[in-house]
Image (cartoon, rainbow, N blue to C red):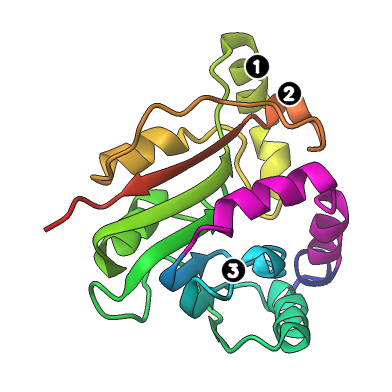
Amino acid sequence: MGIYSERIFPWLVDRALDKPAIDERRARLVGNASGDVLEIGFGTGATLPFYDRTRVRSLSVVEPSAGMNRHARARIEQSGWKVRLDALAGEYLPYEDNSFDCVVSSLTLCTVTNPAQVLKEVWRVLRPGGALRFLEHVASDDPARRKWQDRLNPVQQVVGVGCNLNRDTVAAIRAAGFILDPVNQQIEPSFPLAAYLPIVEGVAYKPPA
């Protein structure tokens, strides 16, 4: 276990993203999640306070980092929610096909080892007509900024414990088969290095059977 990745980094993430504007985005992301819900890359559990208990029938979460899970378990215990937490990555999910009405991804697809495989698994476990709700930072539409993202990405992967600045996540979601309306990039001033971390928010759907 790396001291930085498992002890320092989870603390840094919580501090860096503990901002009202980011909480507003988290609330938009999960506030309308309903039915049987799965969140991939749960991290420290920062989205948990924004779920609507009257809408969510069951909540399952996956997170491979032991350090993140220590924080997440404390949040779950304090919340009083009954949450299934599986300490694993999203590439191979331990759930049956068509298990969930909604999957949530919050700043996760930038870091997973194999985004295409994760999205394949998300598709598998979603019920027909189910929703993938996402908040991600992505490769910039601005060519000059994209060049700098590419240059800075090796450093970011170290500092961000595998996080990538230059993934075209919206294209990956579409390539996985999801139905998705056009998504506009936004700059969130609360983010560190905000110009190089453009944000996308959206809801993608698995077509009905």
Picture quarter with the N terminus: bottom right
Q: First in sequence, mark 2 or 1: give its number.
A: 1
Whole-number angstrom distance, CA of label 2 to CA of label 1: 8 Å
Is 177 left, or right, of 45 in this rendering? left
194 shown above or below 45: above
Tell me if label 2 and label 1 are in contact, CB under 8 Å. yes
Q: Position of residue 75 (x, y in %)?
A: 75, 79
Is 207 left, or right, of 94 in this rendering? left
Nearer to us in this view, 163 or 177: 177
Query: What numbered label is drawn on residue 52?
Result: 3
Amino acid type, label 2: Ala
- Whether residue 137 is visible to the viewer of this picture, yes or no, is yes
Membership of 23 in magenta stretch:
yes
Of marks 2 and 3, the one in the foreground: 3
- Residue depicted at x 45% and y 67%: 34
- Residue depicted at x 84% and y 48%: 19
Amino acid type, label 3: Asp
Q: Which residues are magenta?
A: 8-33
Q: Quadrant of residue 136?
A: top right
Under circle 1, the secondary element is helix
Picture quarter with the C terminus: bottom left
51 shown above or below 166: below
176 shown above or below 8: above
Nearer to us in this view, 202 or 17: 202
Residue matched to label 1: 145
Amino acid type, label 1: Arg
Query: What numbered label is drawn on residue 195?
Result: 2
Q: Kindly report the secondary structure that dominates the magenta region of the rendered protein.
A: helix
